[in-house]
Amino acid sequence: MCGASSPQAPDGSWQLLKLAQDLVQNGECADGFDSPIPGIQALTCQKGTLNSVYNATELPLRWTTGQEDCEEGWGCQDTLMLIHNGPQVNVVITKGCTQAEDQEARVTEHRAGPGLSIISYTHVCRKANLCNDLANSVPLWTPSSTAPEGTQCPTCLSRDECKESGTELPCPAGLRHCYNGILLLNGGGISTSLRVQGCMAQGGCNLLNGTQEIGPIRVREKCNPKGESYTQEKRPCPVLQPWGVTLLLSFAI
């Protein structure tokens, strides 16, 4: 706390008196009370959520969002995740306020293609209002073209049941294993179970490659190589605020 001293300060304390007077004159103290700490203020962030499956030919996408006012000290976050099985892409977006520490924009390949792939973009900022300004999927969208070979696998990205037949496609060269699992995504306004089928280089239940969190989204996977039906966990439906109802989508030219 800053405070002004008496003008009749004893010898040897004039330095403290001068410091106090300078602080008052510079506006750092007033009437004996601390002034607000500069740089800590409430931000306005872009806000929105999206979780939808697209044909790969429809990407890249661009979007617009709403806004929300954050609590003091909170930052703005951007999270974009693409789950790609070849012909389809599940696009997950969440934007809004966060208590997480600042993080430079980061692109992570959780599972690299060809075949099934998962890639994400995450960013946390406090430098300015609406700094979570990612507006398209271009930073993540670099589709590869690999010649197919003899192995065929069912392909599916769906929040419902996958078809039992008729979805088989030839795998890219070198991929001889078929993946069949469910990805559970929860957090940042997203709560869903996504059924995933496609080609992988190795067998097993490791599509996420050890990833447990992507931005504010917690991720888990369940696998069943024999293809029996799954018993999904019952989760309460998320209640989204009006600002998080939708993102308006249009296709990039």
Image (tube, rainbow, N blue to C red):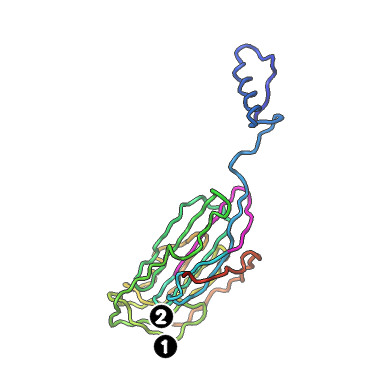
In terms of secondary structure, where does tag 1 sit?
A: loop
- Looking at the picture, tell me which residue is in the foreground, 243 or 72: 243
- Looking at the picture, tell me which residue is in the foreground, 251 or 128: 251
| Disc 2: which residue | 155
> Is 142 drawn above or below residue 38 in the view shown?
below
User: What kind of residue is marked 1?
Assistant: Ser
Q: Quadrant of the N terminus?
A: top right
> Is 213 drawn above or below residue 194 in the view shown?
above
User: What kind of residue is marked 2?
Assistant: Thr
Q: Alpha-carbon distance for marks 1 and 2? A: 10 Å
| Disc 1: which residue | 165
In terms of secondary structure, where does tag 2 sit?
A: loop
Left or right? Give the position of 18 relative to 92. right
Q: Position of residue 132 (x, y in %)?
A: 53, 56
Does the magenta segment cover residue 232?
Answer: no
Q: Residue at x 42, y 72 (%)?
A: 84
| Magenta residues, start to end | 65-82
Mark 2: give few (<14), some (14-19) or many (20+) Cα within 10 Å. Answer: many
Marks 1 and 2, the one that precedes in the sequence: 2
Task: Tell which residue pokes out farthest to the top in this image.
Answer: 11
Determine which of the numbered discs, if any, sits on residue 131 in the image: none
